[in-house]
Image (cartoon, grey):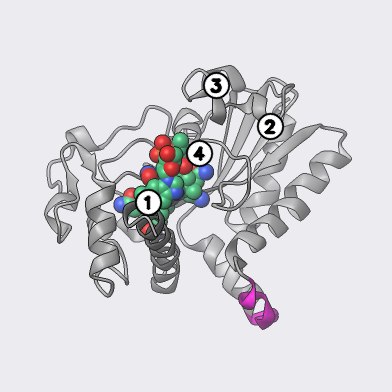
Amino acid sequence: MNGIIDLVKERGAPFGLNLVGAIPTDRYNGAVPPHLQTHAIDANARSIIVIGNGGGYFWNVYRRRLQADPQWERRHDPLDDFTRDVVEREIVLPLSAHGWRFAVVYPFVNSGQTLHFMELGRLAGIGGPSLLGVLIHPIYGPWIALRAALLMDQMLDQPGDALGFDPCPGCIPRSCIPACPVGAISDSGWDVMKCLKHRVEAAPDCTDGCYSRLRCVVGPQHRYPDDEIRHHQGRALRSMRQYYRTRLQGA
Ligand code: B12
């Protein structure tokens, strides 16, 4: 069965999809509330392959795509569409051609039924927990993202290299904590409401990147390109604004 994982790695790597791990569904389902379990999407799934990217290579491939097809950027979610395009063509098609059966799930905000990708990524060894709120990888640090999950009807159990990685408790510099202008990162982790209120109410600040994430001492050489950081910060701010308007102001 390792052939499946090898194929996913082989096809994803040229596009920067360089983080892959697989775990039995039971391990994931036991760790998340019922509405985020795999049954809601595919009752027959026995294992989950998680696919992510570490570092800026995936973004660079995306930029090249935009250069070749500038209209692409006018889409509502150009990076999500690009992700779907790559995953479908490079991974879904060849796996299906081998006769393997599976459902594909994306972590996009508007993708309908989804999974708890952070928990999934941690269990599948894509990254370990951090005070920043995001997962951290031993090589790529906080510069990783989860791009897709395949719910397989075969049993696979091959977590990635970051399984059990938990760097923050032993971190001496703890440079992420003083870096946040509003103290949203502390020994107890990321205070999303503090972060959100500051970002929404003092808009220009943090636009070029999360100061704390930028100061993380793990994998700084793999930090995303500046335009990618701005892109993600902008998208998160968009969600934060929406949440602020609808949930905090009740508008
Ligand atoms: C919603 C969301 C957000 C929201 C809320 C995050 C939160 N923890 O509450 C906002 C917009 C704030 C956000 C910000 C960021 N996110 Co985000 N996010 C997600 C998303 C789409 C869903 C998370 C989720 O619902 N989890 C499952 C539920 C059960 O967990 P929960 O916390 O209980 O869920 C509640 C909240 O999420 C809430 N909610 C839904 N929408 C919103 C929006 C806001 C503003 C708030 C406050 C809450 C909220 O409703 C849920 C039910 O009550 C995931 C993708 C996924 N499908 O997992 C990415 C994801 C977790 N995010 C990711 C990233 C990278 C970020 C940012 C770094 C992006 C950026 N550059 O700014 C920042 C994080 C900043 C930081 N210091 O950590 C990555 C993490 C990868 C990694 N390395 O670990 C993910 C996995 C996406 C991906 N493709 O990789 N994110």
The residue labelled by disc 4 is 117
Q: Amino acid at mark 2?
A: Ile
The residue labelled by disc 3 is 29
Tell me the distance, in whole angstroms, between the alpha carbons under discs 1 and 3.
29 Å
Query: In the image, what residue occupies the spot 48% across and 36% down?
Result: 121
Q: What percent of the width, then of the height, locates residue 172?
A: 12, 41
Disc 2 and disc 1 in contact, CB within 8 angstroms:
no
Within 8 Å of ligand 1, the CB of disc 4? yes
Local crowd size for mark 3, using a 10 Å CA cut-off: few (<14), some (14–19), many (≥20) = some
Q: Which residues are magenta?
A: 67-75
Q: Amino acid at mark 4?
A: Phe
Local crowd size for mark 2, using a 10 Å CA cut-off: few (<14), some (14–19), many (≥20) = some
Please tell me whether mark 4 or mark 1 is closer to you in this view: 1
Q: Secondary structure at mark 3?
A: helix
| Vertical position of residue 133 compared to residue 242: above or below | above
Tell me the distance, in whole angstroms, between the alpha carbons under discs 4 and 3.
12 Å
Q: What percent of the width, then of the height, locates residue 57?
A: 52, 62
**Residue 217 seen in the current view:** no
Query: In the image, what residue occupies the spot 55% across and 21% down?
Result: 29
Q: What percent of the width, then of the height, locates residue 173?
A: 12, 47
Q: Amino acid at mark 3?
A: Asn
In-front residue for pair 38/208: 38
Counting residues from the start of the chain, the first of labels 3 and 2 encountered is 3
